[in-house]
Amino acid sequence: MDKEKRTLLLAAPRGFCAGVDRAIQIVERALEKYGSPVYVRHEIVHNRYVVENLEKKGAVFVDELADIPTDVPVIFSAHGVAKSVPEEAEKRNMFYIDATCPLVSKVHREAERHQKDGLEIILIGHRGHPEVIGTMGQLDEGQITLVETVAEAKEFAPKQADKELAYLTQTTLSVDETKEIVAVLQARFPTIQTPKKEDICYATTNRQTAVKALAQRCDGLLVIGAPNSSNSMRLVEVGQKAGCDTVALVQRATDIPWEMLNACRTIGITAGASAPETLVEEVVAAFSKRFDVSLEEIVTNEEQVVFKMPRVLEA
Ligand code: SF4
């Protein structure tokens, strides 16, 4: 029997960003250089497939430094850590390698600079996300106020009326929603300092642009990524807001909601910054098994960003 036809539109860019790629390479090179086990504090990036693969190679993921013996290397995840974490590692005489994405570190340095300049700092971001915990933890408690929504921006009250304000953002937010929050802050505090270079990173911005282009052309959309991956969740929301009613987050092919996609003839596929291309290939293969698939890539941007390895792991 002939298979039904389906068109799959692949977003480009999609999947791994330079920060995720670097973080995974840091764990792999550390395993090569120091042998297993290498400990990693928290998921190196928010993707089970990536974490399980590294576990097979000898990485051990833990929640806290107290869970790690002191004679093995420990790696801090791409999301960044509060200053107290390397301080504790030093107290325990641990050898650590920091896999924080350089674009997250840039936000950390901005926070320090604003504090030095005597500014009151607002961080726009999601409460409880590891990156937000790490950025807030660059300064003493209470030095940074978190603003998560437009409503919170409307209610924000500066601690000292005579202090200038500055805002920073999490790197993986929705570009459009952040603009709304910033607009409220700028209307209320016209002299508020903005980041010199956008804090929402190139990878987040490019993947959201790509998903908007897809959403206009497809009647179903799959975002490959993890529910705890901020940039993947934002891709789901951006796809919905851009006009696609049938959007699902899937971690891999076994999660594809076939019934929900039943009536969809053109399906867009993208992947969050921590989802490897092999999972995209797996999803495409699952469609090819059921349908007569034609594949088209929608390219909205080319990326050539590569970050350097920490010196201790340079080849
Ligand atoms: Fe870095 Fe952006 Fe990737 Fe996060 S999503 S690791 S900030 S490049």
Image: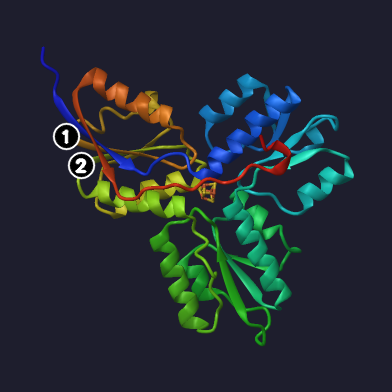
Name the residue at the front extreme: 315
Which numbered disc covers residue 6? none
10 Å crowding of disc 2: few (<14), some (14-19), many (20+): some
- Residue 258 lies in what quarter of the image? top left
Q: Position of residue 93 (x, y in %)?
A: 88, 40
Residue 18: % across, % down: 51, 44
Q: Which colour scheme is used?
A: rainbow
Judging depth in this view, the residue of 99 and 89 nearest the camera is 99
Q: Do the numbered discs 1 and 2 sit on residues whose CB atoms are within 8 Å?
A: yes
Question: Is any part of residue 211 visible from this angle?
Answer: yes
The furthest residue to the top: 1
Residue 111, placed above or below residue 295: below
Cβ at disc 1 under 8 Å from ligand 1? no
Would you say residue 264 is visible in this rendering?
Answer: no
Residue at screen point 63% across, 29% down: 28
The residue positioned 67% from the left and 77% from the top of the image is 119
Quadrant including the N terminus:
top left
Residue kind at label 2, given as amino acid type: Asp
Where 138 falls versus 98 (above or below)? below
Along the horizontal axis of the image, is 101 left or right of 15?
A: right
The residue at 61%/78% (across/down) is 165
Q: Distance between the residues labelled 1 and 2?
A: 7 Å
- Which structural element holds mark 1? loop
Amino acid tagged 1: Arg
SS label for mark 2: loop
The picture places residue 265, in percent across and down from the top left corner, at 16, 34
Residue for badge 1: 265
Kindly give the residue lying farthest to the bottom in the view shown: 162
Residue 99 spot, x, y in % from top left: 65, 43
Read off the residue under disc 2.
Answer: 219
The quarter of the displayed image where residue 3 is located: top left
Q: How crowded is mark 1: few (under 14 residues within 10 Å), some or many (20 or more)?
A: some
